[in-house]
Image (cartoon, rainbow, N blue to C red):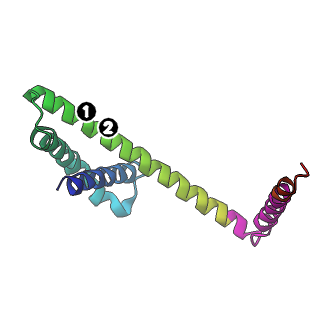
């Protein structure tokens, strides 16, 4: 139960992070879904964390401590998930840009550079194994 609970907690946080990016970038296709996720999602994560601290961990914190701890953990999870989704977006855009740019050259520049790097690296390894360096 606890593993599934925390997997769901992380997935909800990632969903909220993706909705945050979708709302920030104003993607029309996901506007309604992002709005729904941003209105109810943080409350669900907050309730899950409150349940986790109070019932699953059986800690003897006061009510205000539980609320504050759950609130801080909710904010940290959502910010962390938004940062992770942002990094994935940056990687996706960079990969798209790289392959679209190289497609214009029929990948000749990329292939030549890879062959050159591989050849020099292979020669260094061969010289090191043979003891010439």
> Magenta segment: does it hold 107?
yes
Q: Which residue is mark 1?
A: 72
Q: Magenta-highlighted stretch: main secondary structure? A: helix
| Relative image position of residue 94 (x, y in whole percent) | 59, 56
Q: Is residue 43 left or right of residue 34?
A: left
What residue is drawn where x is 9% and y is 30%?
60
Assign a secondary structure to mark 2.
Answer: helix
User: What residue range appears in magenta?
Assistant: 101-124
What residue is drawn where x is 65% and y is 65%?
99
Q: Is residue 75 left or right of residue 127?
A: left
| Relative image position of residue 46 (x, y in whole percent) | 18, 42
Q: Is residue 63 above or below residue 25?
A: above
What residue is drawn where x is 79% and y is 62%?
118
Q: Are marks 2 and 1 in contact (CB under 8 Å)?
A: yes
What residue is drawn where x is 14% and y is 32%?
67
Q: Is residue 104 left or right of residue 52?
A: right
Check disc 1: other Cα within 10 Å, few if <14, some if 14-19, many if 20+: few
Assign a secondary structure to mark 1.
Answer: helix
Q: Which residue is mark 2?
A: 76
Check disc 2: other Cα within 10 Å, few if <14, some if 14-19, many if 20+: few
* Residue 28: quadrant of the picture: bottom left
């Amino acid at each position: 139960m606890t593993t599934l609970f925390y997997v769901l907690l992380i997935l909800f946080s990632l969903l909220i992070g993706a909705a945050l990016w979708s709302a920030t970038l104003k993607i029309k296709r996901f506007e309604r879904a992002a709005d729904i996720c941003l209105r109810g999602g943080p409350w669900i994560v907050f309730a899950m964390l409150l349940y986790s601290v109070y019932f699953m961990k059986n800690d003897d914190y006061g009510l205000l401590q539980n609320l504050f701890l759950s609130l801080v953990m909710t904010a940290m999870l959502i910010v962390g998930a938004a940062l992770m989704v942002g990094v994935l977006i940056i990687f996706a855009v960079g990969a798209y840009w790289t392959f679209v740019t190289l497609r214009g050259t029929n990948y000749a520049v990329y292939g030549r550079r890879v062959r050159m790097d591989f050849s020099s690296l292979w020669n260094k390894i061969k010289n090191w194994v043979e003891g010439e360096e």
